[in-house]
Image: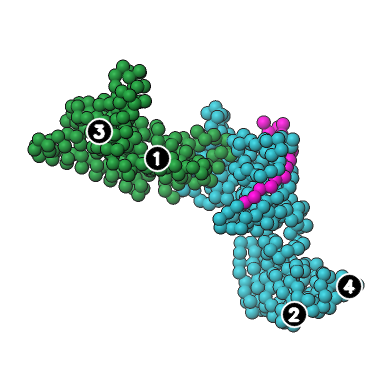
Chain colours: A green, B cyan
Amino acid sequence: MDALLLSFKLAACVSAILMIVGMPVAYWLAYSSWRGKFLLESVVALPLVLPPTVLGFYALIAMGPRGPLGKLWIALFGHGMAFTFAGLVFASVLYSFPFAVQPLMVSFEGVDRKLLHASAVLGAGSLRTFWRVILPLSFPGVVTALVLSFAHTLGEFGVVLMVGGNLAGVTRTVSIDIYDHVQSLEYGAANRMALVLMAISFGVLGLVYAVNRRVWTPWSAK
Amino acid sequence: MVGEVKPATLAAHIRKELRSASAPSFVLDISVEVPSGITILFGPSGAGKSTLLDCVAGLTRPEGGRIALDGDALFDSASGIELPPQERRIAYVFQTLALFPHLSAEENVAYGLLDLPVLERESRVADILGAFRVEKLRKQKPGDISGGEKQRIALARSLVTEPRVLLLDEPLTGLDAELKSAIVDDLRSWNAARRIPILYVTHSREEVDALGERVIALENGRVVSTGAPMDVLDAPRRKRLAQAAGFENLLDGTVLDLREADGVMRVRLGETACEIEVPLGYAAVGNRVRVAIRAGDILLAAEQPRGLSARNVLEGRIASLEQRGAMVIARVECGVTFVAHVTPGAVRALELTVGRKVWLVLKTHSCHVVE
């Protein structure tokens, strides 16, 4: 049960951070007219194609006592970042980044430009336009981003193993726990955990597709 | 706030290149002055009307030029001034209206007033919804509101901010004539106290007649003429403008003879026996010309008229009658088909029916030689 709680805590932290960090990035990708934009788009999509071990490896190096992030962390908190919950959050944020940014970007791009023009001539600056027009109209994209980054973090394995190791209550998440049970031939325990994870994933994806199909919307779709 | 307002003039002298993947690129190169009151920006689609509005509103940057309201520059390429749209205090009603779909009518209207204290904001929103007669819709979302009422709400949303200039991009398309004139009346009475310049884009001749104070005709990015609607639209020099200007009858003909002393020439229409007298143009006997006649300038008579000053009386039969709002469109076959506009009352009084024999009466100077 510890493992499940830890996984939820990790997924919640990661999704929250991704919303805060992902929104400006998605906004910039959606509206910038810079020609070199494709470069940042590629970087954002990188975790989709890289093996988690590659990402985990570089995250581990960066967080290590000689890595830039690790040094900073030691200076701030007096201990290393690798094999801690914070380290896990950092690596997971990187790994789930495209799952948050891409749905946000697509829905920001989908907002009618005329509405943005209308907002501007009515005196609203970019921040007000974002909060009052873009964000409410991107509601399905925000739900998708939130849910996908939550679900994706919940299910990750490779990155966690690379940067978190397997410390009970600190970095032992559900997926690691299942792996452990299988290694020690405890198939019953592995099955229970696996079923829970599958049920959650199904529920979460059902929610995403329902929102995108506008089964429920906060305003009239006409 | 309203009391101190004095009539202002918007002046725009701009150059803007438009590149597009779908259409050949063209250059908008114009100089216009818009005094207070309604000025109509008229021309075929693609003439650059909306681009001009976008430049004035600050949504598009011109390559060069100056846009100023009285002495106050909004854009000046020479001195590097470019106010963002938020600081121009220019209201813009888009063709698509661009009402925020997730906000109620009231919230849409309040959008431009978010910096005001709540009480003042609420009272101004209530006032303007009343002035445009949509107060009962204040809690509804745009998706649940009908076309004409959406247009009123879009106008209210723009005007409640007390703008210095109002830009309207075909805001009333798709409405019937009655509703259109009711909305225009509301707009006129709103502007009576404020007297701001209003630039009204349309390509409908009907709207020009209804609004008509001043017209700027635009074609291919240039101003082709400016003045009162009659002067601008009734002397077409080019076929495209003639069509856009609502000359319902564009007839090909051959010049039969020139009567220079009378300042007229006779033209045979098509290959028919139908001959009309038109003002003398740059043409020689035997030349092909095109004659433009407005449907509203053609008179219909139930009996052969006599003793008229009009030189052209043509016999024909009614091919069709079609009621369109407060107007009946009659097609009359005289060898060539003429389109004439008559009132429903005239149709009843003359007992006009399809197949009936009628006489068309055309003044010489209602016939314009276009080419």
Residues at marks 2 and 3 on the same chain? no
Residue at mark 2: B274
The residue positioned 33% from the left and 40% from the top of the image is A47
At which x and y percent is residue A187? 10, 39
The residue at which mark 3 appears reads as A162
Q: What's the CA distance linking mark 2 and mark 1?
A: 75 Å
For marks 2 and 3, give the one nearer the viewer: 3
Residue on which the image places disc 1: A43
* Residue ranking furthest to the right: B261
Q: Residues within 10 Å of mark 1 (few under 14, many from 20)?
A: few
Measured Cα–Cα span from mark 1 to mark 3: 21 Å
In the rendered image, which quarter contains the N terminus of chain A? top left
Relative to residue B12, is residue A61 drawn left or right? left
Looking at the rendered structure, the kind of residue marked 3 is Met
Q: Nearer the viewer, mark 2 or mark 1?
A: 1
Distance CA(mark 4)–CA(mark 2): 21 Å
Against A63, residue B18 (above or below) is: below
Distance of label 3 from label 4 (alpha carbons): 99 Å
Marks 4 and 1 share the same chain: no
Chain bearing tag 3 is A
Q: Is residue B96 left or right of residue A187?
A: right
Label 4, secondary structure: give it. loop
Q: What is the distance, in whole Å, between disc 4 and disc 1 at their CAs?
A: 79 Å
According to the picture, the residue beneath numbered tag 4 turns out to be B260
Q: Looking at the image, is A65 positioned above or below residue A214?
A: above
Q: Nearer the viewer, mark 4 or mark 2?
A: 4
Mark toward the viewer: 3 or 4: 3
Reading the chain from its start, which is encountered first: label 1 or label 3? 1
Q: What residue range appears in magenta?
A: B1-18
